[in-house]
Image (cartoon, rainbow, N blue to C red):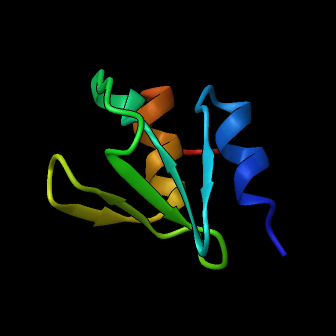
Amino acid sequence: MMNVRGVLEEIGYRVTDDGEYYRTTALYRGGINPTSMSVCKNTGTVFDFGKDARFSLRDLIKLTLNCDEAT
């Protein structure tokens, strides 16, 4: 099982535990609201409330690191 919190923290996100989800800022777009994104602990599915967008943890990594392919 993937350590979602560890992945988020490794790329610079500060996370808070919110039950089945982690909550954090949308660093990839310069966000400052600490609850603007939720990340499902079990699946890594990301929901950015500010953009009304849902995507994978892999896509979040790519957006955050500004790269074409997460390695």
Q: Residue at x 53, y 58 (%)?
A: 57
Labels in figure, total: 0
Residue closest to the eye, 18 or 25: 18
Q: Quadrant of residue 8?
A: top right
Residue at the front extreme, as displayed: 18
Residue nearest the observer in this picture, 57 or 16: 16
The percent coordinates of residue 14 (x first, y second) are: 61, 32
Q: In the picture provided, is 25 more to the left or to the right than 31?
A: right
- Position above or below: 1 against 68: below
Rendered-image quadrant of the C terminus:
top right
Image position, residue 54 (x, y; %) = 29, 66
The quarter of the image holding the N terminus is: bottom right
Q: Is residue 47 left or right of residue 41?
A: left
**Rendered view: 35 above or below 1:** above
Residue at (58, 32) in percent of width and height = 13
Residue 37 position in % (x across, y down): 37, 50
Q: Looking at the image, which residue is at 42% across and 27% down?
A: 66
| Front-lying residue, 15 or 3 | 15
**x, y percentage for residue 39?**
51, 61
